Image: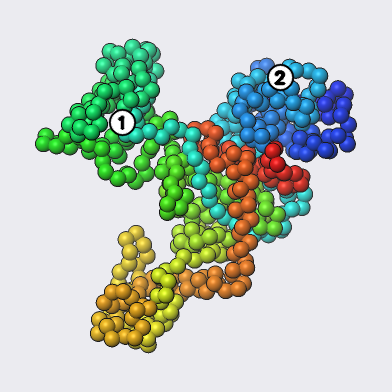
Amino acid sequence: MLGQRKSQRSLFSAGVQLGPKTVERMGLYGRLSQEGSSLFRDSDFAAAYCLDNGRPSTPPSLLALARLLQHYEGISDAQVIERCRYDLRWKTALDLDPLSVKAPFAKSTFQAFRVRLTLHQQEGLVFEKSVAAAREAGLLPGSLRVALDSSPVRGRGAVKDTYNLLSDAIVGVVRAVSLAETTSAEQLASDAGLERHFQAPSIKGSELVEWSDSVAVSQFLRGLLADCDQALMLAQRCELSTPEVALLRKIIEQDIDRGDSGNPPRIRRGVARDRTPSVSDPEMRHGRKSSGKTYTGHKAHLAVELSSGIITAVTTDAPGRADGSQVKSLVEQTVEVTKRKVDVALGDSAYSSREAHRQASEVQVDLRTRMPLLSREGRFAPDAFQVSQDGQTAVCPAGHEATRRYQGGPKNGPKGLYHRWSRALCGHCALKSKCTSGRERSLFVPPDFHERRRRERYARSAQGRQELRQRVVVEHAIARLKNLGAGAARYFGRAKTRSQWQWCAAVANLSLVWGQEATAGA
């Protein structure tokens, strides 16, 4: 049953005993003491609780304040309980008795609160409250201009090689079958000859294999695949179709070439598209920070209001998904939580894709971005060519009209016209060294050719450069969240990682609203 805090503060609470002047000097803790009861109300969390049956719960508003402070300090659940018992700042923020060392709730209660919010899809409630506080403080203008960006998030799950992935997936299937048959997983594994996967944390480290011997490695892999087939037979026997079974099948498909009668099984070369690198967190994926830096985990996306720095939208996605695929989601979330219209969105060149502009058009937002370089340094870019408005004719910088044109386009891309100049023209042209390294030059003209050239000119103009520099506000916001520990996932799964970013964003927003530092150690 939903428990509720008393509306009247206790005479013996820490905040009352210390007095208003001392509380004001306590930074975010003092502001939560003063504003916490109005910021979070127990009724806000009513959807996650029963309202007419059972023993009253710990007030969810108290748990929400404690969780907000947890992300502010970047501490564990056990440390939250310790802070509540012994830290005067926490006692002040939570309106507790400063002389009592009794915890206001158990660690299991605190963890159950997190589960409740996840199950009832209320993890974003506190983030929405922080944006509402910014709106009520007058920090958000009537119409918004936002900056968009993304950031890598290292995953929580253990990343393992193919051999240990297969072993962990086998254990997962056996445990799932044991639950369905209400028997011991260890006994089921022993009966099926799969006990070795339960006896050591690493199947690769527990087996004596001469890894320099390709025949020995193939035999080891063949034995692993036989165990995989045995685990799948157990699942088939009880007609089990669970995520664990699907995960084992996926790992086999993505990483293993079973070979044939003349060829032994082997690990596939290269990395499969959308590869699953972890059994403990199957939603993790490989990604790139840059061309030379990789990571494994998730990707977070943000929208930040330019004038105030308030974070207005947070979401997560797979690292392999393009940044432009989240434009519509970020804008719609911003409109929903701010109750304001978004007029302009700024982004880097990752948001210059046709998909990003299509989504921006759907939500009626003017998306202005940096544009990628389309030619090598010193070579003519597409905007150096004179192309008719209908795209039917093209003239090169030397003044020659294309000699051929034909329909075409890149794979999975827009269709348009290819214009090509003859070898005779290009071979004797004085500008060839600045135009092409091949025998002849060609130019692809998609339907949006002139629109993209217009965006390129704007991005290079003084006005465009000045406006696009304003998007640095989203980079500052990401830095604040990284300082709060958002760069590494605290929990398994993409949904919980998104909630972690939302709580950190709530801390960052409230720190801006109240003029406080965004990290406890600052």
Q: Could you tell me how far apart the alpha carbons at marks 2 and 1 are, in whole angstroms? A: 45 Å
Question: Where the C terminus falls, by quadrant?
Answer: top right
Question: Where the N terminus falls, by quadrant?
Answer: top right
Depicted 522 relative to depicted 348: above or below: above
CB atoms of marks 2 and 1 within 8 Å: no
Residue 197 horizontal/vertical position (percent): 33, 21
Side of 5 where 226 appears, left or right: left
Query: Which of label 2 and label 1 is nearer to you?
Result: 1
Residue 495 horizontal/vertical position (percent): 52, 37
First of labels 2, 1 by sequence position:
2
Residue kind at label 2, given as amino acid type: Ala
Residue kind at label 1, given as amino acid type: Tyr
Residue hosting label 1? 163
Quadrant of the rendered image containing residue 484: top right
Q: Is residue 371 visible?
A: yes
Side of 304 where 455 appears, left or right: left
Depicted 459 relative to depicted 163: above or below: below
Residue hosting label 2? 103
How is the protein colored in the picture?
rainbow
Q: Residue at x 17, y 37 (%)?
A: 259
Depicted 334 relative to depicted 51: above or below: below
Residue 145 horizontal/vertical position (percent): 64, 60
Neighbour tally class for label 1: few under 14, some 14-19, many 20 plus, Cα within 10 Å: some
Depicted 384 relative to depicted 318: above or below: below
Q: Residue at x 30, y 39 (%)?
A: 254
Residue 91 horizontal/vertical position (percent): 77, 26
Residue that protrudes farthest toward the left in the picture = 262
